[in-house]
Image (spheres, rainbow, N blue to C red):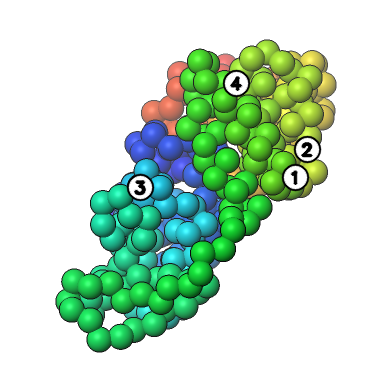
């Protein structure tokens, strides 16, 4: 069975790489290839087709108004109470149109994981959800942060909605000041607006919360490289690559910086690695040309 990189999944599903990384980092999305090897948190994991289905399932639930926190809580409950359900996230379905309740079919009935990590089974008709209702509680700050982050992800790819995306990411950060993904995405929007000083502050704040954050390291390195601060740029590129060894574009960035400072032998090593990871990538012709040079 063929596998997919994180970039492939982003391209196929239309979900941004940053959003997918956040889902993976918070254990919402667990790459099948890594999970089957008993290492679901491994960086640079390969994905299988079933993971594409899982991403589509998450998007469907979010579009129905089901919050990311409710989805994650439901998956955790299923794993704890009925572990024989294969790939619980991909099995989750909205109960009824217009409903934010989610169900999974098990043993001929629809089971609704509801409440705080609790499942309760009772006699029911074959198509009736088994539910344990709990009083609704106010939305937590972390849930609010995740929801604002999701809103920002939907808005940050269109220049016409940059202002709304910025506001959404700021709201996420107000709810969770250590939300590295929100800081990083906010910095990317500022960068696209040529607000480089603000962009850099956001990337630096993301790295205060998570020093190994791949995108924040790459983005900050790009800014440093443009300023001619190559050694500092190299350090951040290396951290990003160490965190995600399968990130082909990080090899390109390192190769280009090494060429700028005259270390062509090191650059060639990264060009070779890039060709191994992305044999049909954007930089293939340039990589081949570099490797053919003396």
In this view, the mark in front (3 or 1): 3
Earlier sequence position, callout 2 versus callout 4: 4
Earlier sequence position, callout 1 versus callout 2: 1
Marks 3,2: beta carbons within 8 A? no
In this view, the mark in front (1 or 2): 1
Tell me the CA gap for discs 4 and 3: 25 Å
User: Which numbered dot is residue 64?
Assistant: 3
Find residue 163 and report its horizontal and vertical position in percent: 60, 21
Q: Is residue 174 above or below residue 230?
A: below
Tell me the CA gap for discs 3 and 2: 33 Å
**Rendering quarter of residue 270:** top right
Tell me the CA gap for discs 2 and 4: 20 Å
Tell me the CA gap for discs 1 and 2: 9 Å
Q: Is residue 15 above or below residue 119?
A: above
Q: Quadrant of the C terminus?
A: top right
| Relative depth, front residue between 205 and 130 | 130
Earlier sequence position, callout 3 versus callout 1: 3
Residue labelled with disc 2: 205
Looking at the image, how many numbered discs can be counted on the residues? 4
Find residue 277 and report its horizontal and vertical position in percent: 47, 38
Residue at 52% across, 16% down? 159
In this view, the mark in front (2 or 4): 4
User: Which numbered dot is residue 290?
Assistant: none
Marks 1,4: beta carbons within 8 A? no
Q: Secondary structure at mark 1?
A: loop
Marks 4,3: beta carbons within 8 A? no
Residue labelled with disc 4: 163
| Relative depth, front residue between 246 and 72 | 72
Residue labelled with disc 1: 177
In this view, the mark in front (3 or 2): 3
Q: Quadrant of the N terminus?
A: bottom left
Q: Secondary structure at mark 4?
A: helix
């Amino acid at each position: 069975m063929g596998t997919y990189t994180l970039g492939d999944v982003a391209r196929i599903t239309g979900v941004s790489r940053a959003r997918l990384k956040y889902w993976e980092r918070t254990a919402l999305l667990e790459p099948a290839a890594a999970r089957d090897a008993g290492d679901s948190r491994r960086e640079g994991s390969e994905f299988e087709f079933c993971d594409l289905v899982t991403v589509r399932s998450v998007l469907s639930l979010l579009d129905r108004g089901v919050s990311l926190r409710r989805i994650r809580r439901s998956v955790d409950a299923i794993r704890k109470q009925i572990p024989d359900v294969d790939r619980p996230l991909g099995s989750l379905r909205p109960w009824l149109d217009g409903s934010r309740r989610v169900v999974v079919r098990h043993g001929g009935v629809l089971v609704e994981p509801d409440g705080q990590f609790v499942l309760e089974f009772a006699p029911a008709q074959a198509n009736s959800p088994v539910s344990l209702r709990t009083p609704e509680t106010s939305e937590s700050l972390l849930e609010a942060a995740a929801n604002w982050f999701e809103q920002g992800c939907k808005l940050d790819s269109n220049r016409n909605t940059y202002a709304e995306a910025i506001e959404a990411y700021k709201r996420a950060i107000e709810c969770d000041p250590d939300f590295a993904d929100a800081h990083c995405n906010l910095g990317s929007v500022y960068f696209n607006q040529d607000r480089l000083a603000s962009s850099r502050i956001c990337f630096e704040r993301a790295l205060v919360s998570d020093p190994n954050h791949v995108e924040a390291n790459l983005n900050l390195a790009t800014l440093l490289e443009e300023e001619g601060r190559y050694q500092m740029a190299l350090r951040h590129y290396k951290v990003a690559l160490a965190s995600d060894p399968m990130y082909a574009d990080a090899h390109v960035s390192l190769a280009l910086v090494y060429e700028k400072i005259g270390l062509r032998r090191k650059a060639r090593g990264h060009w070779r690695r890039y060709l191994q990871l992305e044999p049909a990538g954007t930089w293939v012709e340039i990589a081949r040309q570099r490797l053919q040079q003396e």
